[in-house]
Image: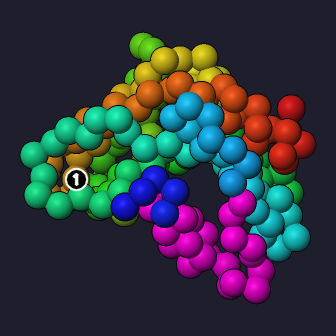
Amino acid sequence: MTFRRSFLTLTTLAFGTLISPAMAQSPTLIGNFGDWAAYKFTENDKKVCYMVSQPKKAEGNYTKRGDVFALVTHRPGEKTKNVFSYVTGYTYKDGSDVTVDVNNNKFTLFTQKDMAWTPDQATDNKIAESIRKGSNMVVKGTSSRGTKTTDTFSLKGSGGAHDAINKACGVK
């Protein structure tokens, strides 16, 4: 499955289950920036902008795993920006944490089902800034079956993608 098609599937699943189709429009590609893509859409008459990438390398002793995505999202109508989220392609072990290492800046995320998030806005901002300036990101987690995974992302183009979502959503 291509990156664009699998991301649109993710978007439909992630956002479509939270809102009715009449309340949101389909995401529009703002642009591709190296290994990152930037998108925007409207939800309840409010702008939502996000950047997304998939790992260059996904490691772990698993037999089946879904698509994996790292996202940074702005929702200015809700006064949120730089929200980092991670979709892992499997269900996380209950109560487990995820570690994110961006050029030796380490962060811990909490998990729920197949997603992970930071604990607060300050951490979101630090991760977003690290992603903008970094060259690679490594994310480690543990599945509900105890399988440890390591996903490695290129951050090539992340600064351009972040600039694009900032502009599209009027975020500074």
**Residue at 56% over, 38% down:** 36
Q: Quadrant of the N terminus?
A: bottom left
Q: Which residue is mark 1?
A: 143
Image x and y of residue 113, in percent: 37, 63
Local secondary structure at mark 1: loop
Query: What are the residue bounds of the magenta stretch?
Result: 6-28
- Is residue 14 part of the magenta span, yes or no? yes
Q: Is the residue marked by circle 1 packed among few (<14), some (14-19), or many (20+) residues within 10 Å? A: many
- Is residue 125 part of the magenta span, yes or no? no
On the question of residue 165 being in view, the answer is: yes
| 14 w.r.t. 147: above or below | below
**Residue at 45% over, 49% down:** 69
Image x and y of residue 28, in percent: 72, 60
| 152 w.r.t. 135: above or below | below
Which secondary structure is most common in the magenta stretch? helix
Q: Residue furthest top?
A: 104
Of residue 86 and residue 133, the one placed in the foreground of this image is: 133
Q: Quadrant location of residue 97?
A: top left
Q: Quadrant of the C terminus?
A: top right
Q: Quadrant location of residue 103?
A: top left
On the question of residue 14 being in view, the answer is: no
Image x and y of residue 155, in percent: 51, 26
Q: Amino acid at mark 1?
A: Ser
Of residue 85 and residue 111, the one placed in the foreground of this image is: 85
**Residue at 30% over, 47% down:** 96
Q: Report the side of 149 relative to 37 (left or right).
A: left
**Residue at 68% over, 84% down:** 20
| 30 w.r.t. 127: above or below | below
